Amino acid sequence: MLSSILTNATPGLRTAAGASVTKALKSTTAKKPLVLGIRREDKNRWERRVALTPAHIKRLIKETGAKVLVQPSNTRIFNNSSFEKAGALIEEDLTKADAILGIKEVPIEKLINDKTYLIFSHTHKGQMYNMPSLRAFLDKNIRLIDYELMTDEESKRRLVLFGKHAGYAGMIDGLHGLGQRLLALGYNSPFIHMGQAHVYPNLECVHTKLRHVANIISDQGLPEAFAPMVFTFTGSGNVTQGARAIFDKLPHENITVDDLPNIFADRYNERYRTRLLALQVNAQDYLERIDGGVYSREEYREHPERYRSIFAEKIAPYTTMLINGIYWESKYPRLMTTQDLANIQNQRELKNRMLAIADISCDIGGSLEFMSHASTIDSPFFYVDARNGLVEHKDIEKPGVQINSIDNLPTELPFEASQHFGDSLYPYAKALATGELDNSVLRRAVICQNGSLEDQHKHLESVMAADQGFRVADNRRKNVLLAGSGMVSQPLVDYLSSSKDTDITIASNDLNEARRLAYQFPNTQVAGLDILDTLSLEKLVKDNDVVVSLIPAHLHTHIAKAAIKHQKHMVTASYLSPEMQTLDQQAKDASVTIINEIGLDPGIDHCSAMKIIDQAHARGDKIKSFISWCGGLTAPENSDNQIGYKFSWSPRGVLTAGLNAARYKINGKLCDIPEGKLFAHRFANVPLYPGFAFEGLANRDSLQYADIYGLQLDQMDTMFRGTLRYHGYSEILDCLLKLGFLNLDTKSHVDVASSREYMLKTLGLRKDATRDTVAKKIAKRLAIPQTDPLLSRLMLALEEFGMLGSSAVHALAAPTALDAMAKVLQQALKFKANERDLVCMSHEFGVESADGRSYDVHSSSLTVYGDASTGETAMARTVGIPAAIATRLLLEGRVKTRGTIRPTIPEIYNPLIERLELKGIIFNESSKSGIQNSLQRRMAWA
């Protein structure tokens, strides 16, 4: 019975007295212990903490008899075997758990319906970036208990927390960052010897290092140009106490706000060379009544709108490093605004003030308006230069205040942090395990249950309503329509169906193919698709929340118009065509997002490129050259035919791509290739990797991507996008084109008994023509001698295609010669069992520094192989999974931009790259100095 209470298995069920089951049975005594789950932290690879340590679990099992399931993890600070020895069961699937305990936010797609979760949800203050998560808790009928709200009833003091560990780590990282920043400005300092917190095994090692740094400060002193060095601390809670515990081990003197003017009047005093100054500020130090009068704590809490912050005028001009630990809500005035920062940075005499901020509280856009995002342990610092508009960058040598805003600081000290947290959580975990939901601490910490917000959190409804993210119509399940059931559909359905709150409808004109696909996955059904039947199409679209179109590109507009009419978002992997682009304003007017070009190429190539381009622009650097190569290929060991190619996606798309015109710019020269001449203008050697014999083809209009990527084409000497193939591919395809096999004229339509007959008809030969006759005809058409090795290769290719022998395809009908060829190749060059494909992508950027003194070549590459054991192709994964992730982002409300768009904006490419990495699709980045190392110089482009 209590299990159903904890899991809300029957939401909305009422007792005879009218009370909900949850409320009616809160005081029921548990007849048996419950099942607790400990989830694996997956927000990032550094998250190694755990809510309960093995010692806590061993005690819990002994005292309550509870069953504990622990998700396996290879990165957690305590290994799997230590939990097993404590009596826990290592289980990947936590669906049997009544309550699930974690640390950080849970990805929406991993939330399990009808469970109780104990986590730091970061939702109760109305954090906009987590409103989609809060909506998911409601939609999935989850009881959410937030550690931040587990408080003492009288004092309101938090009871379950990582204590001072965030402060410890934040201060350690802050000192480390300050040392790096001072060195970049040309000054050695004692802080250069501090490492980030995670490099120290424990706090004892940190204290040893601090003693060493303290001795250097006393013996050698601080940089004179930056003295006196004032460390300003805000807040008085555990975070600030932890920061002070680290700082106080260094030589220092405590000062007050009133001391600041006198200290700086005497700033050349030698005493400030051998000690730091600690300034602890309270609200009354930096707040003043707008209408004048004395500060009143009670009035400020009741009417914060009557006060303003004067921190930027009174304290910041004297501060070297700000350690921010205040609790902030949107009703309070900000400690500093972006304009405040600009005013300080525009004063030359303050160039050595406000060097760094350790924003341990990490309220994004909160008390510090210019703190725009959380940094990471991998990349802990970013810089904000507000002098001429807000500019963020990561160049330690450029102007700007250094900001450290890591939002999971305690995980840098995972062992001690987990022990401390588990000690504070244990009494309530024990109450939970025994079903004591009348525990007042647990009860006060509930944000939502039974699909509704608790009374004290009802105000969050308006916050969620203000969030313009997408929300499904029924508030419960999400519905996705997939139009198309072809080669790349399976990974997409696999990804989406892994979320138990999502129903998928596969609409196809090949119901048998659709059924074979749907049969493999839960919550998946099929429907017929007639793209020209407007009424039936609109009904399909109307009944779903997001539409994914994987049908031929020229048909997308039919679906897009229906999606706009019924205000449904849409995803497609195809190029953004002019016809789709004309729908941009209509989509915006309907508040609809249509994400185009979200496959491989185009798709994740945009994401990787824009990440590097935006980073370069943030540094003030110039992109002088952009070269991008991508190819969906056969794995080398399976490239056993004359074109070295087999088809893992639409053969028609491959063939028509070869007919396009192309434009690009190489070494300052603009180049145009007319339609039908692409194969003849191949690049014979693309030296990406010595082990691969690549040739290449120009890919459409490369120049248009300068605008798309925000680049200045007139300032670039190279702008090129190309397609990779193995040596020999283009030569054979060019022959097929010249012979008429790639004709798109409807007059070339085909309706014959076999692929051999199709070949003979295309060549203008009789049905009884011999092999020699065919060879002679081809040689004549191509104007080559019969002894030319190319003719031998071409004849072998036609044999491999099944056009010369008995394996010929029968009953071949197609609207054009090219369509017929696509059918022949799809049958002849398909992957066999135990064969695999390969996706290879490479971006190269020539980047000139802002001062023009250096030129670096930045590279980003991706290599993905198909899985021969399962038959899943790399092409399907790298097209289907990005499209699925884009769909999930729309369902979660994370994409705010409306209209017909590409994935070239951070709100798409950042989470998409992160989620691709979780699926093993990972870009490798590198950098070399000098243009001589670039493809721009190493390739023969003529």
Image (cartoon, rainbow, N blue to C red):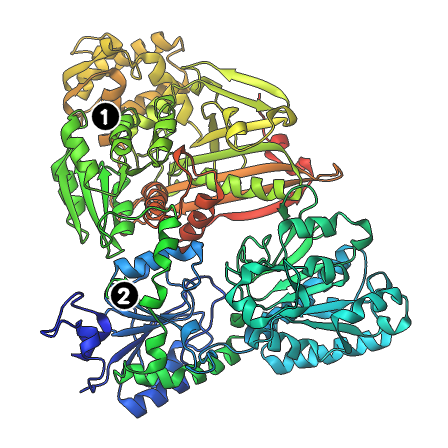
How many marks the image carries: the answer is 2
What residue is pinned by disc 2? 142
Q: Is residue 230 left or right of residue 526?
A: right
Which amino acid type is marked by label 2?
Ile
- In x, y percent, where is residue 192? 74, 66
Of labels 2 and 1, earlier in sequence is: 2
Q: Using the image, determine if residue 915 lies above or below residue 704.
A: below
Residue 635 can be seen, yes or no = no
Query: In the rendered image, which quarter is residue 284 located in?
Result: bottom right
The disc labelled 1 sits on which kind of residue?
Val
Q: Secondary structure at mark 1?
A: helix
Q: Is residue 180 left or right of residue 88?
A: right
Which of the 4 quarters of the picture holds residue 666? top right
Mark 1 is surrounded, within 10 Å at the Cα level, by few (under 14), some (14 to 19) or many (20 or more) other residues, namely many
Between 143 and 311, the one nearer to me in the picture? 311
Whether residue 918 appears in this view of the structure is: yes
Q: The C terminus lies in which quarter of the figure? A: top right
- Where disc 2 sits, the SS reads loop
- Residue at the location (27% across, 80% down)? 437
The residue labelled by disc 1 is 824
Q: Tell me where residue 557 appears, x and y as whole percent.
A: 29, 26
Looking at this view, is 88 or 52 the one in front? Answer: 52
**From this viewpoint, which residue is outermost toward the bottom?**
63
Q: Name the side, left or right, on which 181 lies relative to 76.
A: right
